[in-house]
Image: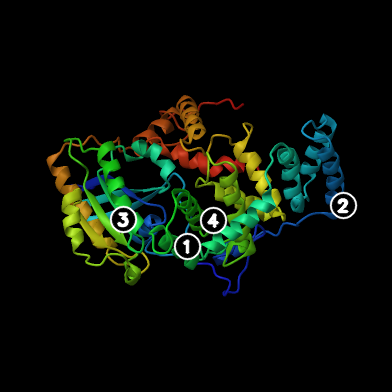
Amino acid sequence: MAATRTHAQLFNSHGFAVMSAAEEYNMSYEDSGIPSVCETFKEVLAECESCGMRKPPILLKKCRQLIKVGGHNSMRGDIWRVFLGISETKTRTNFDYKGNVAELGERLNKCGLTESTCDANIRRISALLDGQYLPLSEEDIKWLRNARQIMLDIGRTFPTHRLYIGETKEKISLLRVLMMYAKFNTSVGYCQGMAYIAALLLMHMTNEEDVFWSILTIFDSEKYLARFYDRKLSRMQTCGGIFSLLLKDRQTKLAQHLVAYTHCMYILSILQKRAGVRYL
Amino acid sequence: MAAQGKKEHLYKILVIGDLGTGKTSIIKRYVHQFFSPHYRATIGVDFALKVLNWDNSTTIRLQLWDIAGQERFGNMTRVYYKEAVGAFVVFDVTRLSTFEAVQMWKADLDNKVLLPNGKAIPAVLLANKCDLASEGFLGNINQLDDYCREKGFHAWFETSAKENIGIEEAARSLVAKILENDETIDHPQPDGDGIRVGEEDGRAPKKTKCC
């Protein structure tokens, strides 16, 4: 069933709506964190942050130990922020996030749109694209198409998670960070699949701008997903090729079966869906 | 395997069309008999299997390939389309641009996949979200008959995944056409034997190194 806020809702410890009695039974309640562990972790992270990208081995070792201890769930966002090195990304790239977000609001406004991803907004973009209101430049059309695609996908990204049910501020943040990334890296733009990664980060990071710098780091650095989402999906295709060779080598029969029944495309969906998770 | 005298067919069917036209919802409705406005965006490709007891002597397994609508995934459609024997091309009756894209999808299909006899695979056009047709752009819907003849569609149906309209009929029409083709063409079928993971020729699984 569709999840709506009007139903009395139960959410599991990850924030997803519990849909069945069986699921409810299996619900586990994880602590958001053990205060003393979180305190220590905060200090270590602050030290790490001051070291920039060259973190001394001793600090890394401390972090590993703390992660093993557990009880640091509420720290996840901070850990990712520090280890992605978003402050480095920030200083390296000259992008005025707040200014550009303000500009986005104005531009939407001019078209009679809002930052909401509700149906009415999406329908209005469709009508605009069908030329029902204003004359549009080629650039406008590209921009509106992109906005529409992002809005459509936000409505279907983790639709049963408490942050993404109904009209929430997190959905607006999601729209902003994805629009900003598309603006920042015009050659890549928005690719389906990005919304999941940004949405996952938003579950753990309270600062929207931090999420923007995080996705920028993830999508553009060689260490993470650079060229994964470009217009030719070039790196995804390379990874897919490598994966199928490995599978053929290690699990010949399984590989043959998959090729016979589904050809190679299972790889694409596996890679796309797991890509972010692998690093987070 | 097949019971005595019983025929089994496995058919690969593509579901294509622009982003957000309702491809996934149509498949969900057809296969799982349910509709939810909250579904996930399809990334790459998703699969669903529908088993049809066509008649007393024929069982048909439809492997439905739900293909992402975003343009850049188009680079990969050649691989997706391989060995498909039928297709649904979906558009949204409330959005003209998705109808205009139908031609592009049909041309893409005809360019990239053919039946073993060299003919285009049968395609059925679905005018989806017909429950919202009052907002639609299709004035005289009968013009679609001419359109289909011209563009080489086998048939077209008005559908609504939300209200469960037209989907069963559209599928029956496509499957009937596929069966008709099948009787005239010799198909190489993939090896139907299942595979047992981790078991090779009855021996213990080989040890694999992990890096």
Q: Residue at x 38, y 57 (%)?
A: B21
Q: Nearer the viewer, residue B14 or A228?
A: A228
- Determine crowd level at label 4: few under 14, some 14-19, many 20+ residues with C-alpha closer than 10 A: many
Q: Which residue was labeled with disc 1?
A: A122
Query: Left or right: where does residue B36 sit relative to residue B101?
Result: right
Q: Dot 1: what SS?
A: helix
Q: Are marks 4 and 1 on the same chain?
A: yes
The residue that label 3 is drawn on is: B99
Residue assigned mark 4: A157
Separation of disc 3 and disc 4 at Cα?
25 Å
Secondary structure beneath dot 3 equals: helix
Q: Residue at x 72, y 49 (%)?
A: A77
Q: Chain of mark 1?
A: A
Question: In 3D space, how far apart are the residues under numbered discs 1 and 3 (Cα atoms)?
Answer: 17 Å
Which chain letter matches label 2?
A
- A98, A243: nearer the viewer: A98
Q: Are marks 3 and 2 on the same chain?
A: no
Secondary structure state at the residue bearing disc 4? loop
Q: Classify A167 as above or below A264.
A: below
User: Looking at the picture, which amino acid does disc 4 mark?
Assistant: Thr
Above or below, B53 against B115 in this view is below
Q: Earlier in the sequence, mark 2 or mark 1?
A: 2
Q: Are marks 1 and 3 on the same chain?
A: no
Q: Please give the residue where the numbered disc 2 appears in the rendered image.
A: A36
Q: Residue, x 46% and y 39% (percent of image)? A: A268
Question: Which quarter shows the C terminus of chain B?
Answer: top right
Instruction: Kindly identify the amino acid type of the residue bearing the numbered disc 2.
Output: Ser
Name the amino acid, label 3: Phe
